[in-house]
Image: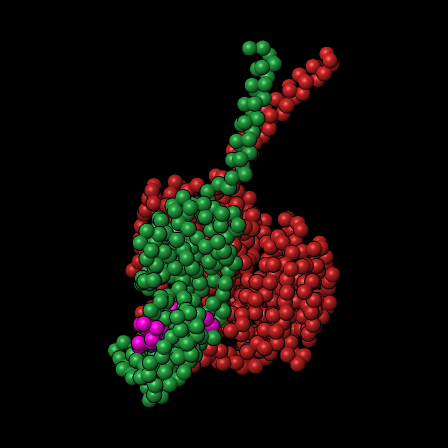
Amino acid sequence: MDHKRIEWLFFIVFLLIDIYLGIEILRSPVNLSGADTTTRSVASIRSEMKSDNIDLPDKLSNAPASGYYLATKNRNYLSNKIDALTNVNVRYSKDENVLYAAPKMTTLLDKNPKKALEQVNKFKNDPKNVPYGKEFKYEPDMSSEDNYVFVQTTDYGEIYAGSAQLSIAVKDHQIINYAESYMGPASPVRELQSTISAVRAVRAMYTNRELTNNSKVTQIKLGYSKLTEVRGSTILLPTWLVWIENKTTKNITLKRVNAYTAQMLQSTTYNVEK
Amino acid sequence: MKFKFKFGEFFLGLATLLAIVLSIVLWIFIMTSDQRFSNIGQNQNNTTKEQARSHSAKSLYDLYIPTTSYGFVDGRLCQLYDSKNNLTLEFTKEIQKAKAVSDVKKIVKSRAKYEEYLNDDAYLQLVYPDEITFSLFNHLNNSNNDNREFNRFFVSHSNNIIYLGNDQTSAIYRIKIKGANFDKLRKFARNAKTKSPVHLVKLQEGYSPFYSRTTNSQVYSYLTNNQSYSYFVSRLLGTSGVTSKTNKSGQTIYSLNYYTRLKVPDPESGEHNYLYTHFEKNKIPNATNRLLDSVYYVHQLGLTEQDLRFFDADGSNVGYVNYIEGIPVFLNQHDLQVKTTFSYDSINVAFNSVNFQIPIPFDGQTQELKPTAEVVSELGAHGLKQSDIQRIIVGFKIEKDSSHHSLINLIPTYYVKAYDEWKSVDEWEKKNVAPYRKPGETVKTNEVK
């Protein structure tokens, strides 16, 4: 081998080494421990999850949000409204604090889902049909074709709790019945505080093994969840609500992350059938 | 032709040499990159000291939020508070977006001029409980090593200029900024629900708000909990190679490799005071790095940081307390939640594990607070002169509620810092201050007119 060939060989070998080292530097190291919420960490968490076959929404906010501790007074708000419900047959369960009702008149819903939703909203907003109906907001991520789910709204955000929900059952394009629970007006018990970002909530779920392999995060929202009951009041706190779909079974699970501390709220996990 | 051939050989040789040198440079860069190796063995919630010092920890702004806001109502200075529209949080959101477009320029250096700014109704004032350095938030300062301090933001009518004041030196600095919009803050300030008239009085460590009227302050209640000692042992020392030794008073000292130890209170004592010590021969860091390093240690502890705020820094100490509704909470009469102490051979972190877990709705209970001047004059009668006082503030004292074992009430009361010690007014009034006093030590105090 002559001198020139050796030089060429050296040049090519070191050029390849340079390219490899360059790529290594450009590639973000997998950060298993950092708590910062920089773009790098978003990319990093995405790549970690991708290797576990976990899909995240394209747009996941990295910005902190804000929220309050809220309190509602524990009272039977719905039982006082029964007399006003002249368009429905009503049964109130004191133990469950749930009002069950079925329309006296048939309401035919349009086959177009958008128009059908408008009709269901109109039904819900009539105080002769549903008490406090205007305080409930349609939640598409918890609803299905035959069950329209609404969550209670407050001046500070939506409450995602079984005790603040309206479910309207539909069959053959007709409203069959509904079940309603209502927590009453909410007021802040603490000043407005900053919360973690959606990215940090997903990261916390992943590191706590709450995101299983082969799943997809379909939606993430900030809403209020029940924390505890104390001195005749229910305390609510801001939580990141994360809808997770199992890619094999297509089951959707709603999980909650404390938006102040990034801890999981295990007790309130439940399955949503679609 | 011959010349062309030689040139090609020379070029090939040069390119090979460059490729070799480049590969060495890249290899050294990779092997010395902190980013690649700093995370090994760290807990998932921890930021490294380097990350903290590089200002990249997100929670820097969570711990370093101004805690008090002032504005003018009918020409009178008032402390502003609104639980629905948190003024200091709104300010912090905007100042995070701000970028300095000019160097820091000192525009005021006299006390008289400084007090003109304090009494100028053109400015909203957002105040830290103690001085922080310019370099802490490096986007507000084009220099990373600026250890000049400030404790007060003056927000003018312009979104492009912000003034930073230092109560102790009477210096005001002007920075031209872009990217922040304080319109919402100004609106919140105009409509703030609580506007308590105050006048600012210069004490040893800056201007303290003196409340002009008797006020009825709300008593808040919380359900509290405490992390177990094993949680802190595992976070701070790890799970292997840890030895323990219990002393006569029931305290247990857990040690790791002679250099790191954690003193844990007796579980039977009902106390929750821990002391973490890391022995390390080192220079005491400069002011900025003390603040940043203390953030690192706070994160290491794994306490709930939701309400934790920077509170006090002197010399080698940096302290943090929980702020509830804009008021600091003192534990065990007068302790801070976390206090980091830097010395030449060790770093000590004294902390309390109490966590204010669940706020209880306000039940109407209030506590009467006298005008501040009256309190100061009473203290003077007990031997603690106004010139001895470094700071006076309203803080919460914790009282256990008999109705539930983990229920506590936060009682507003005056707290005074004198002779570098925080104590409630009640404690100072029971204390003989004569041993503290050095002969000939006097400090002039004057009220801002």
Membership of B65 in magenta stretch: no
Tell me where residue A226 sits by quadrant.
bottom left
Tell me where residue B400 sits by quadrant.
bottom left
Q: Which chain is green?
A: A
Using residue A159 as the reference point, say whether residue A60 is left or right of it: right
What is the display colour for chain B? red
Of B31 and A220, the residue lying toward us: A220
**Residue B179 makes an appearance in the image:** yes
Q: Is residue B38 above or below residue B370?
A: above
Please report the residue visible at 34 percent of the width from the left and 59 percent of the height from the top.
A253
Q: Is residue B146 above or below residue B75?
A: above
Please report the residue visible at 51 percent of the width from the left and 41 percent of the height from the top.
A28
Please report the residue visible at 55 percent of the width from the left and 78 percent of the height from the top.
B193
Membership of A160 in magenta stretch: yes
Give the residues in magenta. Answer: A156-177
Using residue A131 as the reference point, say whether residue B120 is left or right of it: right
Most common SS among magenta residues: strand
